[in-house]
C-alpha cells in the first residue's frame, strides 16, 4: 500500500498529513452543509473494510504551492444545487485551511445525485 502525504514545511520541522486525513476533513465539512444528504461514497471493497478505510469520491491533488479538492455529493431534493455547492466549496476550503494550513486553490464540487424525501407512512 502506497501512502500519500502532504508536507507542511512551516516552522522548523516538517509535518506530514496523510491523504486520507485531508479527504476525511473535506468530507466532514461537506456533510455539515445544510442541504447535503451525504458525501458520495462507493461500495466498500473487502480490503478497504478490513483496513478500516472508507473509499470515497473525494480526491485531493497537490503540488508544492497549492492543493485542489474534488468532492462528490448528493443533494437533498428541493434545495438549490448551485447554492449548496457554493456552501460546500466555502466549508471545505475553510476547514482545510484552518486544520492544515494548506493553500487550497480550488474546491470542485460534483453533484452525483439528488435524494428525495422519504414519504411518511400514515
Image: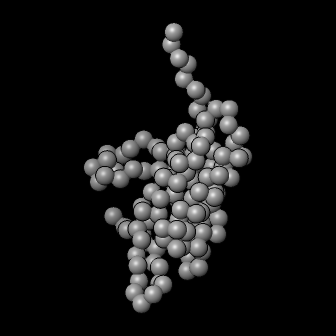
Classify 20 as above or below 86.
below
Q: Quadrant of residue 46 in the image? A: top left
Q: Is residue 92 left or right of residue 7?
A: right
Identity of the residue drawn at 47% across and 45% down: 41
Identity of the residue drawn at 42% across and 62% down: 21
Residue sitting at the far bottom: 12
Its colouring scheme is one colour
Residue 62 visible in this rendered orientation of the protein? no
Residue sitting at the far top: 122
Identity of the residue drawn at 40% across and 79% down: 15
Where residue 4 sits: x, y (%)? Answer: 42, 69
Where residue 101 sits: x, y (%)? Answer: 52, 74
Closer to us: 40 or 38? 38
Identity of the residue drawn at 61% across and 52% down: 88
Where residue 3 sits: x, y (%)? Answer: 37, 68
| Number of numbered markers | 0
Residue 35 visible in this rendered orientation of the protein? yes
Closer to us: 33 or 116? 33
Where residue 64 sits: x, y (%)? Answer: 55, 80
Image quadrant occupied by the N terminus: bottom left
Residue sitting at the far left: 50
Amino acid at each position: 500500500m502506497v501512502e500519500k502525504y502532504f508536507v507542511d514545511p512551516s516552522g522548523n520541522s516538517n509535518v506530514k498529513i496523510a491523504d486520507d486525513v485531508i479527504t476525511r476533513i473535506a468530507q466532514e465539512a461537506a456533510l455539515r452543509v445544510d442541504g447535503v444528504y451525504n458525501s458520495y461514497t462507493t461500495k466498500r471493497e473487502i480490503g478497504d473494510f478490513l483496513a478500516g478505510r472508507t473509499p470515497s469520491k473525494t480526491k485531493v491533488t497537490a503540488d508544492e504551492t497549492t492543493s485542489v479538492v474534488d468532492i462528490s455529493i448528493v443533494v437533498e431534493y428541493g434545495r438549490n444545487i448551485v447554492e449548496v455547492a457554493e456552501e460546500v466549496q466555502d466549508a471545505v476550503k475553510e476547514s482545510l485551511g484552518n486544520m492544515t494550513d494548506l493553500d487550497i486553490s480550488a474546491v470542485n464540487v460534483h453533484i452525483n445525485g439528488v435524494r428525495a424525501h422519504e414519504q411518511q407512512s400514515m
